[in-house]
Image (cartoon, rainbow, N blue to C red):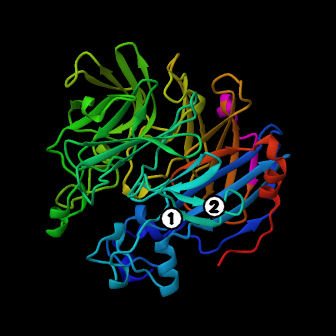
Amino acid sequence: MNAKTQTNPHFFTGNYAPLREEHDIAALEIEGTLPLELEGSLYRVGPNPQYTPRDDDYHWFSGDGMVHAFHIGAGKVSYRNRWARTPKWQIEHEAGRALFGTFGNPATSDPLAQGRNGGTANTSMLWHGGRLFALEESHQPFELDPCTLASKGHQSFGDRVTSRCTAHPKIDPESGELHFFAYSPDGPCSPSMLYGVMDTRCEVTQLRSFTAPYASMVHDFMVTRGHVLFPVTPLTLSVERAMRGKPLLAWDAKLRTHVGVMQRGNAADTLRWFHTDACHMFHVMNAWDDGDTIVAYVMQSETAPGLPDAEGRPGDPEAMAARLCRWTFDLADAGTGFRRDYLDDLVAEFPRIDERYTGRRNRYGFYTCHATSRARGDSESVLYNSLARFDFDTGERSIHTLPHGDVVSEPVFVPRAEDAAEGDGWLLAVAWREQEKRSDLLVFDAMGLPAGPVAVARLPHRVPFGFHGSWRPDDRRQSRSALRCRGDKSSKLP
Protein backbone atom coordinates (compact mmCIF):
# COMPACT_ATOMS: atom_id res chain seq x y z
CA MET A 1 0.00 0.00 0.00
CA ASN A 2 1.48 3.34 -0.97
CA ALA A 3 1.03 6.72 0.66
CA LYS A 4 -1.89 7.57 -1.60
CA THR A 5 -4.15 5.05 0.12
CA GLN A 6 -3.44 5.86 3.75
CA THR A 7 -6.52 8.07 4.23
CA ASN A 8 -8.85 5.07 3.83
CA PRO A 9 -6.53 2.10 4.49
CA HIS A 10 -9.37 -0.31 5.31
CA PHE A 11 -10.48 -0.17 1.65
CA PHE A 12 -7.24 -1.96 0.68
CA THR A 13 -6.82 -4.52 3.44
CA GLY A 14 -8.45 -7.81 4.29
CA ASN A 15 -11.43 -8.63 2.13
CA TYR A 16 -11.83 -5.02 0.93
CA ALA A 17 -8.62 -5.45 -1.07
CA PRO A 18 -9.19 -6.04 -4.79
CA LEU A 19 -8.97 -9.49 -6.32
CA ARG A 20 -6.34 -9.42 -9.08
CA GLU A 21 -7.27 -12.62 -10.93
CA GLU A 22 -10.16 -13.74 -13.13
CA HIS A 23 -11.17 -17.38 -12.61
CA ASP A 24 -13.13 -20.11 -14.38
CA ILE A 25 -13.99 -23.07 -12.13
CA ALA A 26 -16.08 -25.86 -13.65
CA ALA A 27 -17.25 -27.37 -10.34
CA LEU A 28 -16.94 -26.07 -6.80
CA GLU A 29 -16.60 -28.42 -3.85
CA ILE A 30 -20.01 -28.87 -2.22
CA GLU A 31 -20.78 -29.51 1.45
CA GLY A 32 -24.31 -30.70 2.12
CA THR A 33 -26.82 -31.22 -0.68
CA LEU A 34 -27.86 -28.62 -3.22
CA PRO A 35 -31.63 -28.69 -3.89
CA LEU A 36 -32.22 -30.15 -7.34
CA GLU A 37 -34.99 -27.59 -7.94
CA LEU A 38 -32.44 -24.78 -7.61
CA GLU A 39 -31.43 -24.07 -11.21
CA GLY A 40 -30.14 -20.75 -12.46
CA SER A 41 -27.39 -18.21 -11.89
CA LEU A 42 -26.53 -15.91 -9.03
CA TYR A 43 -24.68 -12.75 -10.06
CA ARG A 44 -22.94 -10.47 -7.60
CA VAL A 45 -20.92 -7.29 -8.19
CA GLY A 46 -18.74 -4.97 -6.14
CA PRO A 47 -15.85 -2.49 -6.31
CA ASN A 48 -12.54 -4.03 -7.36
CA PRO A 49 -10.00 -1.35 -8.43
CA GLN A 50 -7.84 -2.43 -11.35
CA TYR A 51 -5.02 -0.10 -10.20
CA THR A 52 -4.05 1.77 -7.04
CA PRO A 53 -6.29 4.88 -6.93
CA ARG A 54 -4.85 8.36 -7.46
CA ASP A 55 -6.67 10.08 -4.57
CA ASP A 56 -5.61 10.47 -0.97
CA ASP A 57 -9.33 10.32 -0.15
CA TYR A 58 -10.28 7.38 -2.39
CA HIS A 59 -13.73 6.01 -1.52
CA TRP A 60 -14.61 2.34 -1.88
CA PHE A 61 -17.82 3.21 -3.76
CA SER A 62 -15.80 4.30 -6.82
CA GLY A 63 -13.80 1.12 -7.55
CA ASP A 64 -14.06 -0.74 -10.88
CA GLY A 65 -16.86 -3.30 -10.93
CA MET A 66 -16.08 -7.02 -10.84
CA VAL A 67 -18.92 -9.48 -11.50
CA HIS A 68 -19.02 -12.92 -9.86
CA ALA A 69 -21.31 -15.57 -11.39
CA PHE A 70 -22.39 -18.81 -9.72
CA HIS A 71 -24.16 -21.10 -12.23
CA ILE A 72 -26.22 -23.68 -10.35
CA GLY A 73 -27.98 -26.83 -11.57
CA ALA A 74 -28.12 -30.62 -11.28
CA GLY A 75 -26.67 -30.35 -7.79
CA LYS A 76 -23.51 -28.61 -9.01
CA VAL A 77 -22.09 -25.06 -9.01
CA SER A 78 -19.63 -23.55 -11.47
CA TYR A 79 -18.04 -20.13 -10.99
CA ARG A 80 -16.65 -17.32 -13.13
CA ASN A 81 -15.56 -13.76 -12.36
CA ARG A 82 -14.75 -10.89 -14.71
CA TRP A 83 -14.09 -7.20 -14.49
CA ALA A 84 -16.74 -5.13 -16.22
CA ARG A 85 -14.62 -3.78 -19.04
CA THR A 86 -16.09 -0.29 -19.03
CA PRO A 87 -14.55 2.57 -21.04
CA LYS A 88 -12.85 3.63 -17.77
CA TRP A 89 -11.41 0.13 -17.28
CA GLN A 90 -10.24 0.01 -20.90
CA ILE A 91 -8.44 3.36 -20.96
CA GLU A 92 -6.73 2.66 -17.64
CA HIS A 93 -5.81 -0.85 -18.77
CA GLU A 94 -4.13 0.60 -21.85
CA ALA A 95 -2.30 3.19 -19.72
CA GLY A 96 -1.30 0.63 -17.09
CA ARG A 97 -2.33 2.93 -14.21
CA ALA A 98 -5.30 4.73 -12.65
CA LEU A 99 -6.38 7.85 -14.55
CA PHE A 100 -9.67 8.83 -12.88
CA GLY A 101 -9.98 10.48 -9.48
CA THR A 102 -12.57 9.24 -6.99
CA PHE A 103 -16.09 9.71 -8.44
CA GLY A 104 -14.37 11.16 -11.53
CA ASN A 105 -13.13 14.20 -9.59
CA PRO A 106 -11.46 16.39 -12.27
CA ALA A 107 -9.10 17.86 -9.67
CA THR A 108 -7.47 14.46 -9.11
CA SER A 109 -7.94 12.91 -12.57
CA ASP A 110 -5.17 12.64 -15.15
CA PRO A 111 -5.61 14.91 -18.22
CA LEU A 112 -6.02 11.71 -20.28
CA ALA A 113 -9.29 11.07 -18.42
CA GLN A 114 -10.82 14.51 -18.94
CA GLY A 115 -14.14 14.22 -20.75
CA ARG A 116 -14.01 10.40 -20.80
CA ASN A 117 -16.67 8.01 -19.49
CA GLY A 118 -15.80 7.17 -15.87
CA GLY A 119 -18.53 4.58 -15.25
CA THR A 120 -17.64 1.69 -12.94
CA ALA A 121 -20.63 -0.74 -13.21
CA ASN A 122 -20.00 -1.79 -9.61
CA THR A 123 -23.23 -1.61 -7.59
CA SER A 124 -25.94 -4.09 -8.56
CA MET A 125 -27.02 -6.66 -11.13
CA LEU A 126 -30.20 -6.79 -13.22
CA TRP A 127 -31.72 -9.56 -15.32
CA HIS A 128 -34.43 -8.10 -17.57
CA GLY A 129 -35.70 -8.79 -21.07
CA GLY A 130 -33.36 -11.76 -21.41
CA ARG A 131 -30.34 -9.50 -20.85
CA LEU A 132 -27.85 -9.07 -18.00
CA PHE A 133 -26.73 -5.64 -16.77
CA ALA A 134 -24.31 -4.34 -14.14
CA LEU A 135 -25.66 -1.09 -12.72
CA GLU A 136 -24.17 2.00 -11.10
CA GLU A 137 -26.24 5.13 -10.67
CA SER A 138 -23.96 7.70 -12.32
CA HIS A 139 -23.98 6.04 -15.77
CA GLN A 140 -26.09 3.95 -18.13
CA PRO A 141 -26.64 0.22 -17.52
CA PHE A 142 -23.64 -1.86 -18.61
CA GLU A 143 -24.50 -5.09 -20.44
CA LEU A 144 -22.66 -8.41 -20.11
CA ASP A 145 -23.09 -11.86 -21.60
CA PRO A 146 -24.94 -13.94 -18.96
CA CYS A 147 -22.72 -17.00 -19.50
CA THR A 148 -19.23 -15.74 -20.35
CA LEU A 149 -19.56 -12.32 -18.64
CA ALA A 150 -18.08 -10.77 -21.78
CA SER A 151 -18.64 -7.00 -21.71
CA LYS A 152 -21.09 -5.54 -24.23
CA GLY A 153 -20.91 -1.90 -23.13
CA HIS A 154 -23.20 0.81 -21.79
CA GLN A 155 -26.70 0.77 -23.28
CA SER A 156 -28.97 3.71 -24.16
CA PHE A 157 -32.07 1.66 -25.16
CA GLY A 158 -32.73 3.52 -28.37
CA ASP A 159 -31.16 6.76 -27.10
CA ARG A 160 -33.83 7.04 -24.38
CA VAL A 161 -31.45 6.54 -21.41
CA THR A 162 -28.68 8.96 -22.32
CA SER A 163 -27.02 9.94 -19.04
CA ARG A 164 -27.51 7.81 -15.94
CA CYS A 165 -29.84 5.25 -14.38
CA THR A 166 -30.53 3.97 -10.88
CA ALA A 167 -28.78 0.91 -9.50
CA HIS A 168 -32.12 -0.16 -7.96
CA PRO A 169 -34.85 -0.47 -10.62
CA LYS A 170 -38.04 -2.35 -9.74
CA ILE A 171 -39.78 -5.02 -11.82
CA ASP A 172 -43.57 -5.16 -11.56
CA PRO A 173 -44.31 -8.87 -11.01
CA GLU A 174 -47.63 -8.68 -12.89
CA SER A 175 -46.74 -6.68 -16.00
CA GLY A 176 -43.03 -7.52 -16.10
CA GLU A 177 -42.29 -3.81 -16.69
CA LEU A 178 -39.13 -2.28 -15.28
CA HIS A 179 -39.43 1.02 -13.38
CA PHE A 180 -36.28 3.12 -13.10
CA PHE A 181 -35.15 6.63 -12.21
CA ALA A 182 -32.09 8.87 -12.21
CA TYR A 183 -30.93 11.83 -10.16
CA SER A 184 -29.05 14.78 -11.72
CA PRO A 185 -29.61 13.59 -15.31
CA ASP A 186 -29.16 17.15 -16.58
CA GLY A 187 -25.62 17.48 -15.26
CA PRO A 188 -23.50 16.97 -12.15
CA CYS A 189 -25.23 18.11 -8.96
CA SER A 190 -28.36 19.38 -10.72
CA PRO A 191 -31.63 19.01 -8.73
CA SER A 192 -33.37 17.42 -11.71
CA MET A 193 -34.70 13.85 -11.64
CA LEU A 194 -35.96 11.40 -14.24
CA TYR A 195 -38.45 8.53 -13.98
CA GLY A 196 -39.06 5.92 -16.67
CA VAL A 197 -40.69 2.60 -17.51
CA MET A 198 -39.22 -0.12 -19.73
CA ASP A 199 -41.24 -3.01 -21.15
CA THR A 200 -40.26 -6.67 -21.20
CA ARG A 201 -38.34 -6.15 -24.48
CA CYS A 202 -36.17 -3.41 -22.94
CA GLU A 203 -38.01 -0.66 -24.83
CA VAL A 204 -38.59 2.57 -22.89
CA THR A 205 -42.32 3.34 -22.89
CA GLN A 206 -42.49 6.27 -20.42
CA LEU A 207 -40.19 9.09 -19.32
CA ARG A 208 -41.00 11.83 -16.81
CA SER A 209 -38.76 14.72 -15.68
CA PHE A 210 -39.15 16.80 -12.53
CA THR A 211 -37.17 18.93 -10.08
CA ALA A 212 -36.35 17.79 -6.55
CA PRO A 213 -36.25 20.15 -3.53
CA TYR A 214 -32.43 20.08 -3.75
CA ALA A 215 -29.64 18.07 -5.38
CA SER A 216 -29.25 14.79 -3.52
CA MET A 217 -27.75 11.36 -4.04
CA VAL A 218 -30.92 9.25 -4.38
CA HIS A 219 -29.83 5.63 -4.25
CA ASP A 220 -33.19 3.82 -4.17
CA PHE A 221 -36.91 4.47 -4.64
CA MET A 222 -40.29 2.78 -4.16
CA VAL A 223 -42.91 1.38 -6.51
CA THR A 224 -46.40 0.16 -5.56
CA ARG A 225 -49.28 -1.03 -7.73
CA GLY A 226 -50.49 2.55 -8.02
CA HIS A 227 -47.62 4.90 -7.12
CA VAL A 228 -43.93 5.69 -7.39
CA LEU A 229 -42.10 7.42 -4.52
CA PHE A 230 -38.81 9.34 -4.69
CA PRO A 231 -36.93 9.92 -1.38
CA VAL A 232 -34.68 12.99 -1.30
CA THR A 233 -32.50 13.06 1.83
CA PRO A 234 -29.85 15.58 2.96
CA LEU A 235 -27.05 13.54 1.36
CA THR A 236 -26.37 16.53 -0.86
CA LEU A 237 -24.35 17.14 -4.01
CA SER A 238 -22.59 20.46 -4.55
CA VAL A 239 -20.02 21.49 -7.17
CA GLU A 240 -19.68 24.86 -5.44
CA ARG A 241 -18.80 23.11 -2.18
CA ALA A 242 -16.25 20.90 -3.95
CA MET A 243 -14.63 23.97 -5.54
CA ARG A 244 -14.00 25.25 -1.99
CA GLY A 245 -12.16 22.05 -1.16
CA LYS A 246 -15.09 20.53 0.72
CA PRO A 247 -16.83 17.22 -0.10
CA LEU A 248 -18.78 16.96 -3.34
CA LEU A 249 -21.09 14.47 -1.59
CA ALA A 250 -21.93 15.31 2.03
CA TRP A 251 -24.61 15.22 4.72
CA ASP A 252 -26.29 18.59 5.33
CA ALA A 253 -28.19 18.35 8.61
CA LYS A 254 -29.85 21.75 8.07
CA LEU A 255 -32.15 20.27 5.44
CA ARG A 256 -35.28 18.12 5.80
CA THR A 257 -36.01 14.78 4.15
CA HIS A 258 -38.60 14.85 1.36
CA VAL A 259 -40.46 12.07 -0.46
CA GLY A 260 -42.20 12.78 -3.76
CA VAL A 261 -45.31 10.68 -4.45
CA MET A 262 -46.79 10.31 -7.94
CA GLN A 263 -49.53 8.08 -9.30
CA ARG A 264 -48.22 5.66 -11.90
CA GLY A 265 -48.97 6.90 -15.39
CA ASN A 266 -49.59 10.50 -14.32
CA ALA A 267 -47.71 13.57 -15.48
CA ALA A 268 -44.75 14.71 -13.37
CA ASP A 269 -46.53 17.94 -12.36
CA THR A 270 -48.96 15.86 -10.28
CA LEU A 271 -46.13 14.76 -7.96
CA ARG A 272 -46.71 15.74 -4.30
CA TRP A 273 -43.93 16.17 -1.74
CA PHE A 274 -44.10 14.83 1.83
CA HIS A 275 -41.45 15.91 4.33
CA THR A 276 -40.05 15.01 7.74
CA ASP A 277 -37.05 15.73 9.94
CA ALA A 278 -33.65 14.89 8.46
CA CYS A 279 -33.14 11.13 8.13
CA HIS A 280 -31.57 8.84 5.57
CA MET A 281 -32.14 5.54 3.85
CA PHE A 282 -29.99 3.86 1.22
CA HIS A 283 -32.20 0.82 0.62
CA VAL A 284 -35.90 0.02 0.33
CA MET A 285 -37.27 -3.40 1.21
CA ASN A 286 -40.74 -2.91 -0.31
CA ALA A 287 -43.78 -0.62 -0.48
CA TRP A 288 -47.49 -1.07 -1.19
CA ASP A 289 -50.85 0.75 -1.29
CA ASP A 290 -53.25 0.38 1.63
CA GLY A 291 -56.35 2.38 0.77
CA ASP A 292 -55.50 6.09 1.15
CA THR A 293 -52.16 5.15 2.72
CA ILE A 294 -48.83 3.99 1.33
CA VAL A 295 -46.65 1.80 3.54
CA ALA A 296 -42.94 1.20 2.96
CA TYR A 297 -40.28 -0.82 4.75
CA VAL A 298 -36.82 0.77 4.53
CA MET A 299 -33.45 0.64 6.28
CA GLN A 300 -33.35 4.05 7.96
CA SER A 301 -30.47 5.83 9.68
CA GLU A 302 -30.38 9.32 11.17
CA THR A 303 -27.47 10.40 8.94
CA ALA A 304 -25.91 8.91 5.80
CA PRO A 305 -23.59 5.97 6.59
CA GLY A 306 -19.93 6.29 5.67
CA LEU A 307 -20.01 9.87 4.39
CA PRO A 308 -18.88 13.20 5.90
CA ASP A 309 -20.79 16.37 6.71
CA ALA A 310 -20.57 19.50 4.56
CA GLU A 311 -17.31 20.52 6.27
CA GLY A 312 -15.69 17.15 5.63
CA ARG A 313 -16.03 15.90 9.22
CA PRO A 314 -16.84 12.21 9.75
CA GLY A 315 -20.31 11.28 10.93
CA ASP A 316 -21.42 9.84 14.24
CA PRO A 317 -21.33 6.00 14.00
CA GLU A 318 -24.43 5.71 16.18
CA ALA A 319 -26.43 8.05 13.92
CA MET A 320 -25.16 6.25 10.79
CA ALA A 321 -26.46 2.85 11.92
CA ALA A 322 -29.45 1.76 9.83
CA ARG A 323 -32.36 -0.24 11.20
CA LEU A 324 -35.58 -1.65 9.76
CA CYS A 325 -38.20 1.10 9.74
CA ARG A 326 -41.79 1.53 8.52
CA TRP A 327 -42.63 4.71 6.59
CA THR A 328 -46.34 5.56 6.30
CA PHE A 329 -47.77 8.21 3.97
CA ASP A 330 -51.30 9.56 4.44
CA LEU A 331 -52.31 10.55 0.91
CA ALA A 332 -55.00 12.86 2.28
CA ASP A 333 -52.37 14.94 4.07
CA ALA A 334 -49.52 15.76 1.68
CA GLY A 335 -46.75 17.57 3.48
CA THR A 336 -47.01 16.42 7.09
CA GLY A 337 -48.71 13.04 6.66
CA PHE A 338 -45.40 11.16 6.88
CA ARG A 339 -44.80 8.87 9.86
CA ARG A 340 -41.67 6.83 10.69
CA ASP A 341 -41.55 3.87 13.12
CA TYR A 342 -38.56 1.60 13.81
CA LEU A 343 -39.50 -2.09 13.78
CA ASP A 344 -36.22 -3.76 14.79
CA ASP A 345 -33.37 -2.82 17.13
CA LEU A 346 -30.58 -4.56 15.20
CA VAL A 347 -28.20 -2.59 13.00
CA ALA A 348 -28.99 -3.93 9.54
CA GLU A 349 -28.80 -3.36 5.79
CA PHE A 350 -29.30 -4.93 2.34
CA PRO A 351 -33.02 -5.75 2.62
CA ARG A 352 -34.60 -8.17 0.12
CA ILE A 353 -37.98 -9.84 -0.33
CA ASP A 354 -39.63 -12.55 -2.36
CA GLU A 355 -39.75 -10.35 -5.47
CA ARG A 356 -43.03 -11.85 -6.63
CA TYR A 357 -44.42 -9.43 -4.01
CA THR A 358 -42.70 -6.26 -5.21
CA GLY A 359 -45.18 -3.39 -4.77
CA ARG A 360 -47.60 -5.66 -2.87
CA ARG A 361 -47.89 -6.26 0.86
CA ASN A 362 -45.18 -8.74 1.85
CA ARG A 363 -45.22 -10.89 4.96
CA TYR A 364 -41.50 -11.74 4.98
CA GLY A 365 -38.37 -9.64 4.62
CA PHE A 366 -34.72 -10.72 4.62
CA TYR A 367 -31.61 -8.70 5.47
CA THR A 368 -28.08 -8.71 6.83
CA CYS A 369 -27.54 -7.56 10.40
CA HIS A 370 -25.42 -7.76 13.54
CA ALA A 371 -26.48 -10.47 15.95
CA THR A 372 -26.63 -7.97 18.81
CA SER A 373 -27.61 -4.32 18.93
CA ARG A 374 -24.53 -2.20 18.20
CA ALA A 375 -23.31 0.73 16.12
CA ARG A 376 -20.63 0.47 13.49
CA GLY A 377 -17.95 2.69 12.02
CA ASP A 378 -17.22 3.58 8.43
CA SER A 379 -14.91 0.60 7.88
CA GLU A 380 -17.76 -1.78 8.80
CA SER A 381 -20.20 -0.53 6.16
CA VAL A 382 -20.87 -4.05 4.87
CA LEU A 383 -19.45 -6.16 7.69
CA TYR A 384 -22.52 -7.99 8.95
CA ASN A 385 -22.23 -11.39 10.60
CA SER A 386 -25.86 -12.52 10.44
CA LEU A 387 -28.85 -13.06 8.15
CA ALA A 388 -32.38 -12.36 9.38
CA ARG A 389 -35.92 -13.13 8.30
CA PHE A 390 -38.61 -10.80 9.66
CA ASP A 391 -42.27 -11.89 9.82
CA PHE A 392 -44.36 -8.72 9.56
CA ASP A 393 -47.56 -10.59 10.53
CA THR A 394 -46.19 -11.73 13.89
CA GLY A 395 -43.30 -9.31 14.46
CA GLU A 396 -40.97 -12.26 14.99
CA ARG A 397 -37.38 -12.30 13.74
CA SER A 398 -35.39 -15.44 12.88
CA ILE A 399 -31.63 -15.21 12.59
CA HIS A 400 -28.53 -17.16 11.60
CA THR A 401 -25.10 -15.96 12.76
CA LEU A 402 -21.81 -16.94 11.14
CA PRO A 403 -18.70 -17.91 13.13
CA HIS A 404 -16.71 -15.10 14.71
CA GLY A 405 -14.90 -12.96 12.13
CA ASP A 406 -16.94 -14.16 9.15
CA VAL A 407 -19.04 -11.73 7.10
CA VAL A 408 -22.17 -12.45 5.05
CA SER A 409 -23.38 -10.65 1.92
CA GLU A 410 -26.84 -9.43 0.99
CA PRO A 411 -29.23 -12.40 0.69
CA VAL A 412 -31.01 -13.10 -2.59
CA PHE A 413 -34.31 -15.01 -2.42
CA VAL A 414 -35.20 -17.72 -4.95
CA PRO A 415 -38.73 -19.24 -4.84
CA ARG A 416 -38.99 -23.02 -4.80
CA ALA A 417 -41.46 -22.86 -7.69
CA GLU A 418 -43.39 -20.18 -9.56
CA ASP A 419 -46.52 -20.95 -7.57
CA ALA A 420 -44.82 -21.54 -4.19
CA ALA A 421 -46.14 -19.69 -1.14
CA GLU A 422 -44.43 -16.43 -0.20
CA GLY A 423 -41.03 -17.14 1.36
CA ASP A 424 -41.02 -20.81 0.35
CA GLY A 425 -37.62 -21.16 -1.27
CA TRP A 426 -33.96 -20.46 -0.67
CA LEU A 427 -31.71 -17.62 0.37
CA LEU A 428 -28.36 -17.36 -1.41
CA ALA A 429 -25.49 -15.38 0.11
CA VAL A 430 -21.71 -15.24 -0.12
CA ALA A 431 -19.67 -15.51 3.08
CA TRP A 432 -16.14 -14.26 3.79
CA ARG A 433 -14.28 -16.80 5.93
CA GLU A 434 -11.91 -14.74 8.04
CA GLN A 435 -9.77 -17.62 9.31
CA GLU A 436 -9.30 -19.20 5.88
CA LYS A 437 -9.09 -15.94 3.86
CA ARG A 438 -11.53 -17.20 1.23
CA SER A 439 -15.28 -17.26 0.46
CA ASP A 440 -18.22 -19.65 0.28
CA LEU A 441 -21.61 -19.59 -1.43
CA LEU A 442 -24.28 -20.40 1.18
CA VAL A 443 -27.70 -21.87 0.36
CA PHE A 444 -30.36 -21.65 3.10
CA ASP A 445 -33.92 -22.86 3.32
CA ALA A 446 -35.50 -19.42 3.73
CA MET A 447 -38.09 -20.67 6.22
CA GLY A 448 -35.48 -22.56 8.26
CA LEU A 449 -32.80 -19.90 8.55
CA PRO A 450 -31.62 -20.65 12.13
CA ALA A 451 -30.75 -24.23 11.12
CA GLY A 452 -27.91 -22.95 8.92
CA PRO A 453 -27.18 -23.60 5.26
CA VAL A 454 -28.42 -26.75 3.57
CA ALA A 455 -25.47 -26.54 1.17
CA VAL A 456 -22.15 -24.70 0.94
CA ALA A 457 -20.18 -24.27 -2.29
CA ARG A 458 -16.53 -23.68 -1.37
CA LEU A 459 -14.36 -21.27 -3.34
CA PRO A 460 -10.57 -21.63 -3.26
CA HIS A 461 -10.22 -17.83 -3.26
CA ARG A 462 -12.10 -14.89 -1.80
CA VAL A 463 -14.91 -12.72 -3.18
CA PRO A 464 -14.17 -9.15 -2.02
CA PHE A 465 -16.87 -7.31 -0.11
CA GLY A 466 -19.47 -6.03 -2.55
CA PHE A 467 -22.97 -4.66 -2.73
CA HIS A 468 -25.83 -6.38 -4.52
CA GLY A 469 -26.78 -9.49 -6.45
CA SER A 470 -29.49 -10.85 -8.73
CA TRP A 471 -30.88 -14.25 -9.65
CA ARG A 472 -31.49 -15.47 -13.21
CA PRO A 473 -33.65 -18.61 -13.31
CA ASP A 474 -32.89 -21.20 -15.97
CA ASP A 475 -35.36 -21.15 -18.85
CA ARG A 476 -36.32 -24.81 -19.22
CA ARG A 477 -36.92 -24.21 -22.92
CA GLN A 478 -33.26 -23.23 -23.27
CA SER A 479 -31.67 -25.97 -21.19
CA ARG A 480 -28.71 -26.35 -23.53
CA SER A 481 -27.84 -22.69 -23.01
CA ALA A 482 -28.17 -23.15 -19.27
CA LEU A 483 -25.82 -26.11 -19.34
CA ARG A 484 -23.37 -24.05 -21.40
CA CYS A 485 -23.29 -21.47 -18.61
CA ARG A 486 -22.39 -24.16 -16.09
CA GLY A 487 -19.76 -25.85 -18.22
CA ASP A 488 -18.29 -23.21 -20.56
CA LYS A 489 -14.48 -23.41 -20.62
CA SER A 490 -13.95 -20.28 -22.75
CA SER A 491 -10.60 -18.54 -22.44
CA LYS A 492 -10.01 -15.42 -20.39
CA LEU A 493 -11.01 -12.18 -22.09
CA PRO A 494 -8.28 -9.69 -23.00
Residue 320 image offset from top left, x and y in percent: 32, 46
- The amino acid type of the residue labelled 1 equals Tyr
- Tell whether position 453 is magenta: yes
Identity of the residue drawn at 31% across and 48% down: 304
**Residue tagged by mark 1?**
16
Label 1 neighbour load within 10 Å: few <14, some 14-19, many 20+: many
Q: Is residue 354 visible?
A: no
**Could you say whether the residue bearing mark 1 is in a helix, strand or loop?**
helix
Quarter holding residue 21: bottom right
- Quadrant where the image shows the N terminus: bottom left
Which of the pair 287/187 is nearer the observer?
A: 187
The single residue placed furthest to the bottom in the displayed view is 95
Can residue 174 be seen at all in this image of the molecule? yes
Asked where in the image residue 476 lies, by quadrant, the reply is: top right
Q: Position of residue 67 (x, y in %)?
A: 60, 61
Magenta range = 447-457
Asked if residue 397 lies left or right of residue 329, the reply is: right
- In the picture, the disc for residue 435 is 2
In-image side of 207 versus 210 (left or right): right
Compared with residue 194, is residue 356 higher up or lower down, i.e. above or below? above
Q: CA distance from mark 1 to mark 2?
A: 15 Å
Determine the secondary structure under disc 2.
loop
What amino acid is labelled 2 in the image?
Gln
Q: Nearer the viewer, residue 345 or 425?
A: 425
